[in-house]
Amino acid sequence: MFLGVRRMLLESSGRPKLMRQGTRWMSKTVDMKERLAELIPKEQDRLKKIKKDYGKISLGDTTVDMCIGGMRGIKGMLWETSLLDADEGIRFRGLSIPECQKKLPAAISGGEPLPEGLLWLLVTGEVPTKEQVAGLTKDFRKRSKVPGFVFDVLNKFPTTAHPMSQLSAGIMALQTQSQFAKAYEEGIHKSKVYKGGKTIPPDPKLDYAANYAHMLGFTDKKFHELMRLYITIHSDHEGGNVSAHTVHLVGSALSDPYLSVAAGMNGLAGPLHGLANQEVLRWIQDVVKEVGADVTTEQLKEFVWKTLKSGKVVPGYGHAVLRKTDPRYQCQREFALKHLPDDPLFKMVSKIYEVVPPILLETGKVKNPWPNVDAHSGVLLQHYGLKEQNYYTVLFGISRTMGVLSQLIWDRALGLPLERPKSLTFGWIENYCKGKGQMKKK
């Protein structure tokens, strides 16, 4: 795609054809590369103006706590595709999750947005038409054939290999097909680069999410609908999380998209990032095992307190940024209320939602007692028969590629530089702070 965009930029001429959508004028093109060719020059000029007019303005102070605390809270990265608000949750190009559910084209068979539509939104910043989404789906179908050697690589893995190891290896195997790497080897300038063993073949009639579900072996249309929702809400979450930041960092070295995404997937595989919904599901199953599925409110409260007093946390509750119920949790809850209201584990999730926040507030130690996205997703997957918990992070990874690759397109288009933050030693920090203290005394 990156090379195709550059080619479009060189070949295109004249003004884009526009159509009116509400109060906005939209491009008529149904090809995303053509639309990018129209958008990129404007965004390049916008970046130049921002650097010229605001380049010396401070974005805030950096404290020692931020430096030694994982750079938490430091404003230091450009990430156009999404923004996380502590109160409202994630916004994809300015649209909240409810707005995306309302405005993005959905499959005829259901009401959840098609991930292809979200990808168009992430890449272009525009809500696509049905025709534009259909064009993207058609393009995905053309690209859906996986070379046989990739399966040869995966089939060599032992049966004990983690699914995330297989995903990363599969991406690395595909890297041999990288048009970006080939072009870079041929000398293209940085400024001109944007951009059981049994397998089930893709169905050319299905959209991206439904096809993914189909190739997993699921024919239930409601599970297809769940995959549309799941991929959409997991696609992006700002740029500071481990997987997104890793793709951005590795991509800043002009590593091709395969290398960059594989690196991000390895970060996502870490227990502190991509394992959360598995931990939630296991905790819920522990509740059922110890107390029973028909747990009373008092019994559940006792179990929660027991978890906290043992030095553990209640998984699925709290978030590094959010200070209200995660809207991604809320839309999954609405899905469950619509499609599986009587599921025993969903009823348990609902009861936990009532019990946990007040207890966490009572401890006086928790800034955000509300559930996040992981508090719900595992129960939905279990309901439809996807019980292989180790695979859940792969679902997360497949979804997150949409966001990180959308941003990587713009990293390339805008020519963002190699990321290289300044590191500090204990001694430097101690000497610097001592000097600041002496200045205050004077």
Image (cartoon, rainbow, N blue to C red):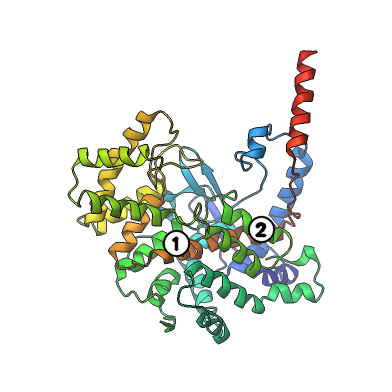
In this view, 115 is above or below 187? above
Crowd rating for badge 1 (residues with CA inside 10 Å; few <14, some 14–19, many 20+):
many
Task: Name the quadrant containing residue 182.
Answer: bottom right
**Residue 88 can be seen, yes or no:** yes
* Looking at the image, residue 96 lies above or below residue 61: below
Residue at 52% from the left image edge and 72% from the top image edge: 166
Lateral position of residue 162 relative to residue 64, left or right:
left
Crowd around label 2: few <14 · some 14–19 · many ≥20 (10 Å): many
Q: Residue 58 falls in which quadrant of the image?
A: top right
Name the amino acid, label 1.
Ile
Is any part of residue 108 visible from this angle? no
Q: Along the horizontal axis of the image, is 158 left or right of 222? A: right
Q: Which residue in the rendered view is the most extreme toward the front?
A: 310
Q: Quadrant of the N terminus?
A: bottom right
* Residue at (60, 40) in percent of width and height: 72
Q: How many marks?
A: 2
Q: Is residue 144 above or below residue 362?
A: below
The residue indicated by pointer 1 is 231
* Element at label 1: helix
Quadrant that contains the C terminus: top right
Which residue sits at x=39%, y=37%?
369
Percent position of residue 224, x then y: 35, 68
Give the CA distance from mark 1 to mark 2: 21 Å
Which one is in front, 423 or 3?
423
Residue under the image location 50 percent in, 51 percent down: 272
Residue 318: percent from the left, percent from the top? 43, 41
What amino acid type should be assigned to the residue bearing mark 2? Trp
Vertical order, 350 against 211 (above or below): above
In the rendered image, residue 240, in percent from the top left (x then y), is placed at 59, 48
Q: Is there a contact, CB below 8 Å, between mark 1 and mark 2?
A: no
| Residue 410 numbered mark, or none | 2
| Helix, strand or loop under label 2 | helix
